[in-house]
Amino acid sequence: MKRILIVVALCLFGIAGMGHAETITVCSYGGTYNKALENAIAKPFTEATGIEVIMVSFPNYAKMKAQVESGNIEWDVVEPSINAFSLGTHDGIFEPLDLEGIPADDFVKGGIQPYGVSTVYYSHNVGYRTDVWPKGQGPKSWADVWDVEKFPGPRAMKYTAYSNLEAALLADGVPPNQIYPIDVDRAFKKLDQLKPFIKVFWKNGGHAQQVMRTHEADLGSFAAGRMLDIAKEGVPVACEWNGSVVDLDYLVILKGCRHKAAAMKFIKFSTDPKRQAELAKASFYGPSNLKAYEYIPDDLARQMPSYPENMKSAVVINGDWYREHGKDVTARWEAWKMQ
């Protein structure tokens, strides 16, 4: 009888334990992108492993660093930009990754690092309302965004210096391959010309979408994926690929993470080319695993930042430059916005 009770107790414990699957928290950029990441990677990952995934936003670097320094890790996997990735690697706030089995040769150059595995390319592009200028007749370059006589109307730009300095220099005629090291004085001088016409400094992708949905601006700098996403909903917007300012995101694990093994499984799962293709198709962001393009229709692939033709005139953001100069540039940028 005692043996039967023990067996029953063990069975009940096992059944109860099934309700306590491991859970990880993944922090990305919110809105439609988080939904794409959830559908393309997180949900299939849970189905394959039983590990639950909670999606949150926003991957602010100060919050990442504070979690590590306090030992109170809320985010297991984080998707920082190339700028924040460079900072975090330098500051030592990421766990070293188990890269065994990840086909590094299939990825973009630099896409697989000891502390990060790349996910997507996203880009800051010239964007405009097609009910103001028909598609193909709107601004085609950053110089056009600065041309307030040919293209009058309110502008919207990202709220950080990051990507705007590059756009300003491109508008001033600097070739894409000569943007770095950034001539900060020249960039701000060019930005001075545009500032009276900037109505909105958008804070994240969702805010940028809202700005264009409500027609707060006619044109400006926008993440192409976010604009293409709302274009599907019928919002009259279009983007140009000439001079796109491109960022590469990485997946990292914060140092001290209590679910490192599960987090690492999630990161490895994200490297599958079919999974990256699904994420790219849902978000319009370019995959970092170039084999993913084998599973993306060509007409859709041409609307992605890492598509070879689009990269020809692109500027890839230099995270190391921002790590060295970001603090001073940010202070100057914030003062400039207040002027």
Image: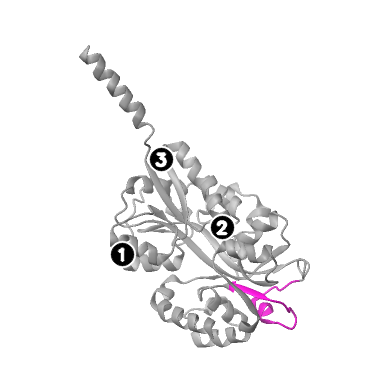
Separation of residues labelled 3 and 1 (CA atoms): 27 Å
Neighbours of disc 2 within 10 Å: few (<14), some (14-19), many (20+) = many
Circle 2: element type: strand
Q: Which residue is mark 2?
A: 286
Circle 1: element type: loop
Q: Is residue 135 left or right of residue 66?
A: right
Q: Pointer 3 and pointer 1: residues touching (CB < 8 Å)?
A: no
Circle 3: element type: loop
In the displayed structure, 149 sits above or below 310; it is: below
Neighbours of disc 3 within 10 Å: few (<14), some (14-19), many (20+) = many
**Residue at 39% in and 58% down:** 116
Neighbours of disc 1 within 10 Å: few (<14), some (14-19), many (20+) = some
Mark in front: 3 vs 1: 3
Q: Amino acid at mark 1?
A: Gly
| Mark found first going from the N terminus, 3 or 1 | 3
Q: Picture coordinates of residue 262 (x, y %)? A: 36, 45
In the displayed structure, 263 sits above or below 115; it is: above
Mark in front: 3 vs 2: 3
Quadrant in which residue 152 is drawn: bottom right
Q: Which residue is mark 1?
A: 92
Q: Picture coordinates of residue 143 (x, y %)? A: 66, 80
Q: Amino acid at mark 3?
A: Ile
**Residue at 50% in and 71% down:** 317
Please provide the residue range marked out in magenta.
Answer: 138-157
Q: Which residue is mark 3?
A: 51
